[in-house]
Image (cartoon, coloured by chain):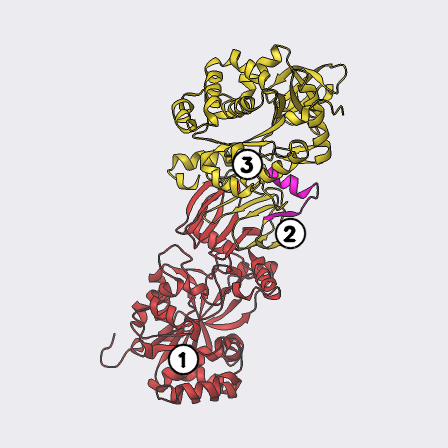
Chain colours: A red, B yellow
Amino acid sequence: MDSSKPSNRDHFFAIIPAGGVGSRLWPLSRASTPKFLHDLTGSGQTLLQDTWDRLTPIAGNNKMIVTGDVHASLVASQLPELDQANLILEPSPKESTAAIALAAAVLYSRDPEVIIGSFAADHVIREDDKFVATIEESIKLAATGRLVTIGIVPTEASAAFGYIKKGVAIAGSKGFEVAEFVEKPDIQQANRFIFTGDYLWNAGMFIAPAKLLLDVLSKTQPALHAGVVELAKHWDTDQRASKLEEIWPNLEKIAIDYAIAEPASRLGLVSVIQGEFEWHDVGDFAAIAELQSQGVTNSLAVLGSAKVLADSSSGILVSETNRLVALIGLKDVIVVDTPDALLITTKEHAQKVKALVEALKQTGHSDLL
Amino acid sequence: MDSSKPSNRDHFFAIIPAGGVGSRLWPLSRASTPKFLHDLTGSGQTLLQDTWDRLTPIAGNNKMIVTGDVHASLVASQLPELDQANLILEPSPKESTAAIALAAAVLYSRDPEVIIGSFAADHVIREDDKFVATIEESIKLAATGRLVTIGIVPTEASAAFGYIKKGVAIAGSKGFEVAEFVEKPDIQQANRFIFTGDYLWNAGMFIAPAKLLLDVLSKTQPALHAGVVELAKHWDTDQRASKLEEIWPNLEKIAIDYAIAEPASRLGLVSVIQGEFEWHDVGDFAAIAELQSQGVTNSLAVLGSAKVLADSSSGILVSETNRLVALIGLKDVIVVDTPDALLITTKEHAQKVKALVEALKQTGHSDLL
């Protein structure tokens, strides 16, 4: 590294948007304690803590959390190293664009050369060394004035993720142009994607100069852009609260894919770098069970400190109580045992938990959401 | 009825032995709160209370409970009408002969003409009018100097019960001689039994003059007989406790089938009267589920006050907590939700709960038994 000028890494800042309830993980994941605040891997750390630690070799203390203000105390207790200046608390949920763009605008006001990276707080990543190498490669490419997204090399034809179609290779880097972002395909389409070898999973991670991101936003969502820039201007002053109260409620709710990634892609500004590390979005309990069993069939995975007696049962038990749980003769079962709610289903029906949470809303059980 | 002499019913006394943990009903049924102390039918009453009420039209207040002394306070609170003089508390479990013979000896010492009937506290009986008629018929026959057992007319070829083979009809009564008591058969044998029409289920109920029962016992188990007679002699005195302490620990542990019913049968003293009422011994959760669903398939039976969300699940949920229980896509499931233990299995595996309780003993979870 040429030490005569500051490296790109010195200007790098990781943003961790920590939001989303993850209703397919009810009753573990609740409005008050969403997915990212839980240990879903048995690592002894929550997904948020794992995300934090994974980014340290790249970003050091340059890490910013954006989360709902209701989660402030749990986030602070899980991340004692977090500098409060790098904690953005949203007064209400506004989807990913407002969260990430506000963080980018605040960081841009502190350092106009900042390169930001956005990393979801609730994914599981293994092979951290490969992750670090991929992100460092991405920072270099982003520094050339690009929005760089990470495309995970698929390990199966999944219909659960959006895809990124690779275009031409970018000379002098490991990146490719993004030919196209593709929404979640059906399974036949997914099979075709895998067959071509040109498609990668969209893991929702990207790296870009904050200036570039804000420039794109100013064109696609001018009001939202003006809002976050105005907020950023007053962020490190005593007017933060009053400005938040004035501006935040009116910000557009829109996913960053639609507000920035796809429009920027059509402008030829988006590249993709392939990630070959192990990545899981652990969207439902079946996914967690798969992750825990690591290919061992007919075993019962246990998350939590439950006493368990299991006679030839397979699947996953997630326990937040100290109760003894006895399972006999169940196949691919999912049991989630919490103090006020118990879920029992099977891997096959794991996706239906989301509809069940809807049913809870309809039937007036909002205390359990 | 000839009112010039006391009727047999005036000398009738019902004995309700309330013992047996029912380990196939764990974790609902525990050493401290066995099966008979639970509502397993959704009637709003426990099995013990149902048994008590069922006998009132026949026995009035002439009802005696024999139970473990650890259950004294729960039994008293469930049966406020129980006269404490008619409560026998066993210092330790000694199987059915000691329990019933002591009760018979105490009642005999109070009324030498007493006719006793013994009725388990943990069976489910419906069609109470038929039950009452059957027992009244049995009392008449018992008064002629016989031990009368009730044989349930089978509704299926069950391998779960012992059988009684009918002999010749007894003139002037609805009874039959007992040709033979048969232990639980295998399913092929059970099928043959049903085919002949000569076999009835042994429901463990019998009616006899106390004197006859004690006479048989004096021949088959002289030491046990001497023990209960000695206890009875001092029962209604201030020496009850000291005599219990001296005699009870040494009493033989033996089931009444072996000590009295079968030997008496070989002496030609035992008759059987057919019971055509609905009878269930609710031995495991599958049996309770069957009972609750009453032939309606693919439904979920719920015992207890749980809030339940069930999407196309069938089987039974027994809840002793106020937790919400959500079930998705489970077939013939058995869920038993108690404050300190959770059991999940299927109807197919309901019998294995007993082995699980054994495993709990082996693994030092005696607090949960």
Q: In which quarter of the image is residue B128?
A: top right
Disc nearer the start of the sequence (3/2): 3
Judged from this view, the residue extending furthest toward the left is A4
- In the image, residue B126 lies at what x, y percent? 69, 36
Task: Assign a secondary structure to mark 3.
Answer: loop
Q: How far apart are marks 1 and 2 (CA)?
A: 45 Å
Instruction: Tell me the tag on residue B312.
Output: 2
Foreground mark, 1 or 2, reads 2
Chain for mark 1?
A
* As drawn, B325 above or below A224: above
Which residue is located at x 77 percent, y 16 percent?
B172
Front label number (3 vs 2): 3
Mark 1 residue element: helix
Helix, strand or loop at mark 2: loop
What chain does mark 2 sit on?
Answer: B
Q: Quadrant of the N terminus of chain A?
A: bottom left
Q: Name the residue under label 3.
A: B83
Q: What stretch is highlighted in magenta?
A: B285-303
Res A103 label: 1
Q: Tell which of A180 and B94 is nearer to you.
A: B94
| Residue shown at the point (53%, 82%) measured from the top left | A252
Depth order, front residue of A305/B26: B26
